[in-house]
Amino acid sequence: MAFKQNDLAYAKDALEPHIDKATMEVHYEKHHAGYTSKLNNAVEGTNLADKSIEDILKNLDMDNKAVRNNGGGFYNHNLFWDVMSPNGGGKPTGDLAKAIDEAFGSFDDFKEKFSNAAGGQFGSGWAWLCVHPGGRLEICSTPNQDNPLMPGVGCGGHPVLGLDVWEHAYYLKYQNKRPDYVNAFFNVINWEEVAKRYSDGK
Ligand code: MN3
C-alpha cells in the first residue's frame, strides 16, 4: 500500500497571518507531495513496501539516502501539519504541562529552549520535542529530513512536536527572519494534539 499525505484538517489560508497560504500551498502540494512520491518509488518492490513508516525509520539503514531523505520528509511533514491548528496557540495543560515544567522549569523556559534549537539548527532541518518511555521530555534538532526515530541521530525518544526550519517553510513570508517564524509558530501549535502524542508515546 502506497504512503499517502495526511489530509489537512484546516484550509491552507487558515493559519494566516502566522503561516501564509502561498507557503502552505507550495509546502503541502509540492515539497511534501514530492517526498511522498519519492518514498513510494524508493520502497516499491523492496521488503520495506509493506512496513509502517515508523517501523521503516526506526530500523533504517542510514546509508539508504532515498529512504532516509524521503521517508523522513514524508513522516516529518505529516506530523507538522497535525501539530498545527487555526485554534492553536496558548499553553499546554494537564500531564504535558507538568512534564514540560519538570523538564524545563516553566513553559517560558521550554519556549526559549525550543526556539533556540530551531534557530540554532544550521541550514535545513527540524526542531523537536520528544518523549522518552516513562514520560521524560527532550528538546533537540536534526539536519535535513532526519528524524528522532532514526538510529544514531543524537536526538532520541518519540517526537511529539516538530518544527520545520527549512527555508521553504518560511522564506516567502519571513525571508531570512527565522526567529520571527519560530515565534509565529507558537500561535498555531495544536497543544491538544501534542498532548495526545505525549500520552501515546510515553
Ligand atoms: Mn518542509
Image (cartoon, rainbow, N blue to C red):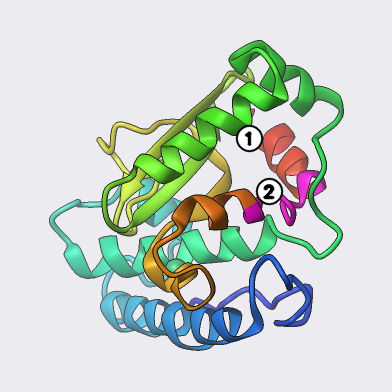
Three-letter residue code for mark 2: Phe
**Quadrant, the C terminus:** top right
Q: Position of residue 38 (x, y in %)?
A: 32, 81
Q: Can the viewer see residue 29 in this picture?
A: yes
Give the residues in magenta. 184-192
**What crowding class fits label 2: few (fewer than 14 Cα within 10 Å), some (14-19), or many (20 or more)?**
some
The percent coordinates of residue 175 (x first, y second) are 43, 70
Q: Quadrant of ligand 1?
A: bottom left
- With respect to residue 132, does 191 lie above or below? below
**Element carrying mark 1:** helix
Q: Quadrant of residue 20?
A: bottom right
Q: Position of 181 compared to 39: left or right?
A: right
Mark 2 vs 1: CB contact within 8 A: no
Location of mark 1 (residue):
201
- Identified at 30% across, 84% down, the residue is 41
Residue 70 placed where, x, y %?
33, 70
Task: Tell which circle, 2 or 1, labels the residue nearer the N-terminal end.
Answer: 2
Marker disc for residue 186: 2
Closer to the camera, 69 or 97? 97
Is residue 2 visible to the viewer in this orientation of the structure? no
Nearer to us in this view, 158 or 179: 179
Q: How many marks?
A: 2
Ligand 1 within 8 Å of disc 2? The answer is no
3D distance between C-alphas at marks 2 and 1: 22 Å
Residue 46 is covered by the magenta coloring: no
Is 52 or 35 nearer to us in this picture?
35
Mark seen at residue 129: none
